[in-house]
Image (cartoon, helix red, strand yellow):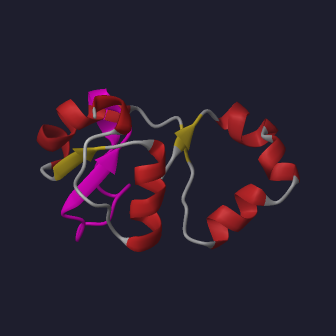
Amino acid sequence: MSPSSSPQAIRSSPRRADGTLESLEQSGVRIVPDLCWCSISEPVFPTRTRTLITNSGKYAHYGPGLSNRVVRFGSLADCVEAAVIGGVPARLPSWLR
């Protein structure tokens, strides 16, 4: 999982003080500062990656052409689930059901 945020938000996050960000990073989450959606390609995700999941409608639309990968659109919970177990069932977001 590679969430992106501004360097200022990362530095001042209350989650840095309580150890949450450190725990996330130790578990393999890589927080990428100032990453424009159009730059999300290799090496942000590994070359062996075949499918991506995003909660960004814009990246879900443009991502396949930019990344040459299959891109799925889902909720933030779907993105976290995919990071933890390696995938999510095919389903529409709850607000589209």
Give the magenta range: 38-58
Image quarter of the C terminus: top left
Residue 49: in magenta span = yes
Q: Residue at x 87, y 51 (%)?
A: 17
Q: Could you say which is closer to the camera, residue 57 or residue 26?
A: 57
Residue 57: in magenta span = yes
Q: Which quadrant holds residue 82?
A: bottom left
Report the residue that reaches farthest toward the right.
Answer: 17
Q: Could you say which is closer to the camera, residue 61 or residue 33?
A: 61
- Image spot of residue 70 (x, y percent): 15, 52
Q: Which quadrant holds residue 5?
A: top right
- Image spot of residue 49 (x, y percent): 24, 65
Report the residue that reaches farthest toward the front.
Answer: 97
Q: Could you say which is closer to the camera, residue 59 or residue 87?
A: 87
Q: Is residue 11 above or below residue 51?
A: above
- The answer to whether residue 9 is seen in the rendering is yes
- Image spot of residue 38 (x, y percent): 30, 33
Residue 68 shown left or right of residue 51 in the figure: left
Q: Which residue is drawn at 21% across and 47% down?
A: 71
Q: In this view, does 65 lie above or below 17?
A: above
> Mostly what secondary structure, the magenta segment?
loop
Q: Which quadrant holds residue 75?
A: top left
Q: Which residue is drawn at 51% across and 47% down?
A: 3
Report the residue that reaches farthest toward the top.
Answer: 58
